[in-house]
Amino acid sequence: MLTISVSFVTLQDKLPENFEDMSQAEREPLQQEMIKDLGKQLETNRDGLTKKYFEQATSKSPGLLFWNNILWAIAFLLPAYFILKKIDAKYNDLSDELGFGSIGTGIIAGFSLFCLVGSVSLLMLLIGYKPKGNDFEAMLFKNLKDNTYLLAWSIYSIGIVTGIIEEWFFRGFLLTHYVKNGYGRVGLVITSVIFGALHNSPEGSPVVPIILTGVGFYFGYFYLRTGNIWVSISAHATFNSLGLILAYFFGDKIT
């Protein structure tokens, strides 16, 4: 999915200003040459293109953050939905009670988790170890400093939308499937490990997916305890948003 976004943005940047005024005969060879050149760049300089895309998404075009979430939903949620429908499996259809009680419980849970993870991070700093995040996170946190426009887009995309998408997939689909088959505890562990593993990145510290496995376990525990997907969604959105707000004020010090 990231490759699709990177390719789209790279091609957009290479379009000449008078592209719309060109005839179809003029466009076709230009498009073919651009696609051919993009293929070569993806083979030889994929990391460079990815970093350039991250820079654009976190400084010039934060709407790309939302685009990434839409692609993620298409790649994971839609296939999961149709597979579960095909095998007549149970999943959460988001019909759980949505009100101040469920949202408030989720916000408190998310805030508590943020404080807990923050305390663990502080402890690691005190012993001289600072886990390295991925390149996107580092660039986002750096560019978030005092950038209200980017903060608003980030909370909307990474805080709220990501919270909904990831919770519906991991807890609403996967964990619910285990629960309905009588394997709630086993499912909690398995889905938490998957959650942490999918947040792993080659350039990041191996400690990060371990911490995020615990984060996934926390969200799953509250889902099982309350039986309400909106509680875990609110907790997830709160946890993500607090990290973004922290970066807004101290981005240059926490990257």
Image (cartoon, helix red, strand yellow):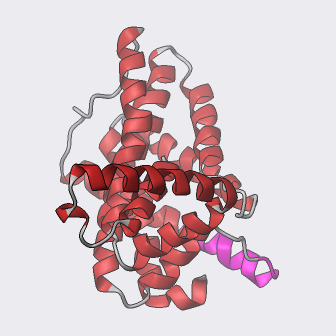
Observer-nearest of 147 and 104? 147
Q: Is residue 26 left or right of residue 53?
A: left
Q: Residue at x 44, y 88 (%)?
A: 145
- Image coordinates of residue 134 in percent, x first then y, are 63, 66
What is the x, y in percent for residue 30? 38, 56
Q: Residue at image x 38%, y 10%?
A: 86
Quadrant hosting residue 83 = top left
220 and 42: which is toward the camera: 42
Magenta span includes 119: yes
Q: From the top left corner, tell me how far across and down residue 142 is, in percent.
A: 51, 83
The stretch in magenta equals: 116-129
Which is more toward the observer, 162 or 183?
Answer: 162
* Count of number-bearing discs: 0
Look at the image and tell me whether residue 1 can be seen.
yes
Please report the residue visible at 41 percent of the width from the left and 70 percent of the height from the top: 57
Q: Is residue 31 left or right of residue 100?
A: right
Q: Residue furthest right?
A: 127
In the figure, 181 relative to 240: above or below?
above
